[in-house]
Amino acid sequence: MSHPILPLAERRRLREKQIKKHQLANLLTHWFNVAMWLMLLPTGIAIISSPRLALSPAIMQEMFRNLFGGTANLIRFHYSVGLFWIFVLAFNVLIGFRKYFIPFSRERLLLTRDDIDWLKIKPMQMLGLMKDKPLPPQDAYNAGQKLYMYAVILGTLGIMVSGVVMTFHTVFPPALIQWAQPVHWVSVGAVVAGLIIHVYMGAVFPEEKEAFFSMFSGKVSAWYARAHHEKWYWEKVREELEWEEKVTVEVEAEARAHEAAAPGAD
Amino acid sequence: MATKKRYGFVIDVSRCIDCRACLVACSVENQVGMKYTRIWVRDLGVKGDYPHLERTFVPYNCMHCDNPPCTQVCVSGATYKDADTGLVLVDQEACIGCGYCVDACPYSARYLDRERGVVDKCTGCIQRLQVNQQPACVATCVGRARMFGDLNDPNSEASLALKNADTVQRLDYELPDGTHTGPNVYFINGEVMDPAVLPREPKYTTAETAWRRLLIPAVVAGIGLSFLGQATFFTKQLLEGEKEFEE
């Protein structure tokens, strides 16, 4: 994070100015995902009760079985919510394919040269080394967020595919069902490992406070954008300038047309 | 696992003539498909020299073990040892038919019903037990080779038969972790271990083994590291206090 030295007045202006970062569709999908995970993760952990695997505490297994009325009902709840989750996410991706999905995967997802450098420097700085080395400028999502995105995308696909196999177990061969269970669990594990950092960085870490509120308002301050997502910030500034220029040209053209239509009216 | 009641079978192998009426009665009672059977009769072959020949038939089914290896591998607990009766049962509404338990059973007493996508096995006819009736196989056995009852109750038919038996054999099996299966099927009045056809070593599917040996350590390490990382920064944040980041 480069904190440029700017005059106080300019800093105040940037802090006041709000830039749109997230569209409403993104916010809704994100919080929908959160709601589904809150229901699916605890029930999923509670289902796994094999003593050989020893992956959940007995009290949790018993509590959820009592709460839902037995193993079968617990599993029914889990896959019903899961299927709803798959349906809504797939629907969102399909309906927003051109507006959100393609631009996102083209512009926001891939690691650039700067991202690779960031990944080399940032972990060192977190360990207290290379403090004087500047971090390369980052896009709307920094390299760490991009890595988490990979875990989420691959993990989500793994969870969904293996979940569907287990839910519709009558049509799939047993060998597939046998593997679907560890695949489901590992995919969840990969996402959870990232999720711990994601929640901490997003909701608790002081420097990223704005990122958290932006997940409700959709907006961040220009100051935050410039400090944390410099590339994206300048892109936004360029867009704004272009827009201003376009509007100026249009207004001037309109004024000329107006004058030509009614010469000497004033 | 100690249970209130300990229902089990006592099988008098000297009385079995391999008529297999028990297989039919079981399939009818429990609506087992034509392709499958929940219980079996094993022919140990002809033994001895002419004219002193003998042949032993061993009827068997799920041993309703005290320490069943099948329930240990079941991911969801769809198969379990019933705490009231001691019977090993499958909740077929929870079972997804992965077959971990089928491979793990040292007695090969379970099968995968592909049509229904679930695992099926002997239930000790628990539906008949609840109305004080004997399991279908026991009720139908003309030679009275099969007996069933609470082995914790010294006056049950099974316990009495066990007490009065000439010989008693139990196909106990020592599991890799040193514990014993503790089967609740007792074979009386005959030799059932020669040739030793049962039990076999429990098999653990590649998926389950890879999950337990490889994937759990990897994921636990990953989540642990991630948790430790955020915990460190969180502690630092709490100790140092927060300042307005912009300044």
Image (cartoon, grey):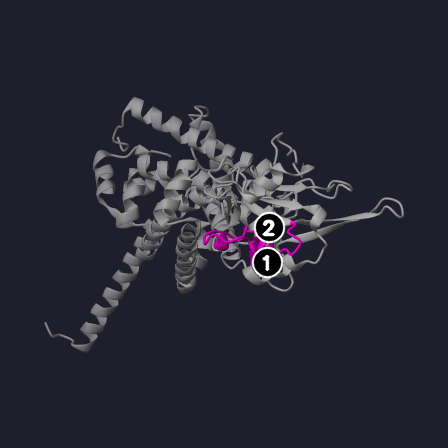
Q: Position of residue A248 (x, y in %)?
A: 25, 61
Q: Chain of mark 2?
A: B
Extreme-right residue of the structure: B50
The residue drawn where x is 53% and y is 56% is: A165
Three-letter code, disc 2: Gly
Q: Is residue A235 visible?
A: no
Which residue is nearer to you in this view: A86 or B180? B180
Is tag 2's residue or tag 1's residue first in the polypeptide sequence?
Answer: 1
Q: Position of residue A119 (x, y in %)?
A: 48, 36
Residue A206: which quarter of the image? top left
Magenta stretch contains residue B135: yes
Extreme-left residue of the structure: A266
**Which residue carries the number 2 mark?**
B99
Which residue is nearer to you in this view: B156 or B42? B156
> Bounds of the magenta span?
B116-145
Magenta stretch contains residue B221: no
Q: Are marks 2 and 1 in contact (CB under 8 Å)?
A: no
Question: In the drawing, does residue B159 fall left or right of residue B168?
Answer: left
* Circle 2 crowding by C-alpha within 10 Å: few under 14, some 14–19, many from 20: many
**Residue B26 badge:** 1
Does dot 1 land on a helix, a strand or a loop?
helix
Q: Is residue A254 above or below residue A35?
A: below
Which residue is nearer to you in this view: A186 or B91? B91
Question: In the drawing, does residue B58 fall left or right of residue A73?
Answer: right
Q: Is residue A169 visible?
A: yes
Q: Position of residue B150 (x, y in %)?
A: 52, 42
**Residue B12 badge:** none
Question: In the drawing, does residue A96 fall left or right of residue B44?
Answer: left
Which residue is nearer to you in this view: B200 or B14? B14
Q: CA distance from mark 2 to mark 1?
A: 22 Å
